Image (cartoon, helix red, strand yellow):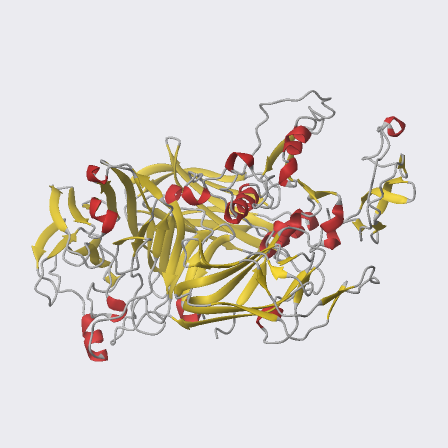
Amino acid sequence: MIEGVRYTYDIEPNSATDPDHTKLTDGKDTAAVWFPKPFNSVTVDFDLGSNYKVTRVEVDAYRAGTRSRVRNMQLFTNSGTGYTLVGIMQNLAGADYNLKLQSRPAAGVAPLALISKTPVTFTFDNIDRECYQVRLWHQDAYDPGPHWGLAEVRIYGAPITEQFPSTASSPEAQAAALEPYSVPDTEGQLVFREGNFDRDPEKELLLANPYVTLVIEPSLGGVIGSFSYRGVAFTQPKNPQAPGGGGGFLSDHVSSQSIDGDWFNAAYGYTVTEESRDRISVRLSATGKTDSLKYLTFNKTITIRRDRSDVQVDYDIALDEKATVPLPFAFWFHNYVGTRAATPGQSKSRRSTFYVPEDSGIRKLHWPTEKRSDVWFNNTVRGWAGLVDSGRNIGLVFGFDYRHLMNVYSWGAKSNNALPTLEWRFNEISVPDGSSFKTTFTITPFHSLDRISGAGPSMVGTINYEATDDPVPSRVTATIISAAARGATAILRHRLLPVGDWQTLLTKDVTLEVDKPLNVTADFTAKSVGTHVFSLIVEKAGEELLDLEEPISIGEPKDDYVLRPKIQQPRTASTRVNVQYTSMDYETPHVKWARPYHGGKIKALVLIDGRYQREVIELAQRVDLDFDSTFLYRTDVGESLSDYYGKTTVDDLELGLTRLLSENPDWQVLVMAGHMFRYFNEDQRRHVEQKIKDGAGLVVVQPDMTDPMPSLSPLLRRGDLHPRGGQWTRTKDHFITNGIPWRALPDVVEWYPYELAEAAELLASVKDDPLLAVREYGKG
């Protein structure tokens, strides 16, 4: 059984709760129970901690009654390209035991008491899938009961210790395979040579300029088998006997195959397409071998220039017209990346750290201290990923097209002396028959930086903040390195979260030289505590070349920083459902109560039960809002998103909510139905809570299910629906209630009774029940 499994719910248990998320994997009879059933399904995502080959999953579940049966239980696995259905159970009867229902429990007492000590065990066998996440999904769980519970989930499998095995027969042979290529001194010239630079009989290609030296292996997957910069190698030789089964940059794959697919170690043909005094370009090509892949050809052109320190790789992935129809492919690019200690033995450097930009900021991955064997970066927001060896202040950045990016991945190679991998996968792309898909990558080495605050096409940099004691101003320094000589304008700026606008600290024309660091410095005095974001924009003739961002906490850290994407990704097969409905084109008859509003447009996020999504637009037509929204609802019912009925998935809804929050970090008010927090994950809930503490507003309509964040609601503990009429009554003068013609309002037809939360102010009521209330939460 796999130990140390962590998990999250999309809907937290509300009867027998599981606040620490431990009950399902602690080996005990304690259960998580849902009552009453708030939605039609519950999803539990299990994080295995690293890659496993999962063989079996056992689910211990409680049932609602003696005649109940499982209506729908589904199991999914995720290997990094999205969840795949691997097992389903429907209409299965269980053992004879019950949950006892208490009709009106006392306050603080769970409405269910478990009678049976032995749950039913449902087993998914013969899974045999490599994955790092497992998803368990219930639809209506037990039928006909309106409540159900899970006691334990056991996941069985074996850890995957090698991404690909070495062919060496001994440790000595593995070590020998790491011997560097025998490359002649090119004396800092632009050079192309064909020759044999290693021990095998196959021909390699040498490309060099004053900054970098490359050895390309046409016979072994067309990879860059060696990449050296300032005497430091950033990959290991492409040798099947090496630890990890090889090495090199830009091994080509499709996600439908395992790592040893059609192009792995395949022979690539090559042509020198340009060899001039200024540049050298080599085109490598190989066609697939199996099924429809035999119509697909990877063409990549690797280019170095005399006066640039970066390497450009242009892909032209062609589908032969013999395919007769367009075909979908998810492309995957694999690299062994790292440095080795400058000591005998060729051990991996312990000073190397990966940097990948995600929505929560630039994430660092330091393999010597990482407990997992592999790491997925599924929330990327920029088109780059890089490495810094802090012992040498030297590094490298890969640049790729964010528009197509699905995720970034790294295999740690913790069980051997192989370098870790840095890989990226593209979303599924439909390639027309007789046509091709084109994309460009850059490889930019650099020095004199101890970390990465951002990267652009052939440019990289970092921002440092030096705090000082008053009254001396602090200092902000941005250091940038460019792979090409150019003139540009540098703009150093700052903003205070959560809602501060960008303030320019310095604008300066700069001259960038090849591979030489340039500093841009400004004094800064913080006027308040909080999260201060510093940014450097480098642009030329209106084109942005680089955007660095670095959040700095002054005072208590608030965890409120979001790194936003610079460009939007086109919709792909996995995210083809448009859940962002904000069109104001169709206008119904109405009174524009606050449009325009004297205070200007309010930056608002509006979330409502998906069946009533139109009400978001109706609100925006009456109040002056700068608003955004996303569709959130069950995906299994007829009221689902009608344009995409039968196609909308949970992943579509999750991606929509992630987009909403990441693209709108400066929202001023969140307007939502009371149950919408159930769709938020823990990080998103913390983000909302912190924003409100810092001064943002929250409007909750029918706060019957504000749980799991009841501390935000002024009305608590909803009672049963009152189906009788009553008049609105203002109970207090307030900005919200003043100016409203209360007597002209129609009677309230029916309402839910609530209890007023501590420190809340009652503003309006119906009979003796509160209808409208406010409370403060921090500054919000």
Left or right? Give the position of 302 relative to 773. left
Q: Is residue 77 left or right of residue 780?
A: left
Would you place residue 514 above or below residue 129 in this image?
above
Q: Nearer the viewer, residue 30 or 572?
A: 30
Residue 518 seen by the camera: no
Q: Among all residues in the image, which is located at the extreme top?
A: 589
Q: Give the image quarter of residue 323.
A: top left
Tell whether 373 sits left or right of 646: left
Image quarter of residue 488 = top left
Q: Nearer the viewer, residue 744 or 180?
A: 744
Q: Is residue 311 left or right of residue 426?
A: left
Residue drawn 18% across and 45% down? 306
Q: Nearer the viewer, residue 525 or 159?
A: 159
- Count every numbered label the image shows and give the total: 0
Q: Position of residue 341 (x, y in %)?
A: 30, 70
Vertical placement of residue 215 versus 368, above or below = above
- Where residue 742 appears, as percent x and y from the top left, is 87, 30
Quarter of the image holding residue 642? Answer: top right
Q: Position of residue 162 (x, y in %)?
A: 32, 70
Q: Vertically, is 630 above or below 366?
A: above
Spot occupied by residue 649 in the image (x, y as percentages of width and height): 51, 46
> Residue 93: in sight, yes or no?
yes
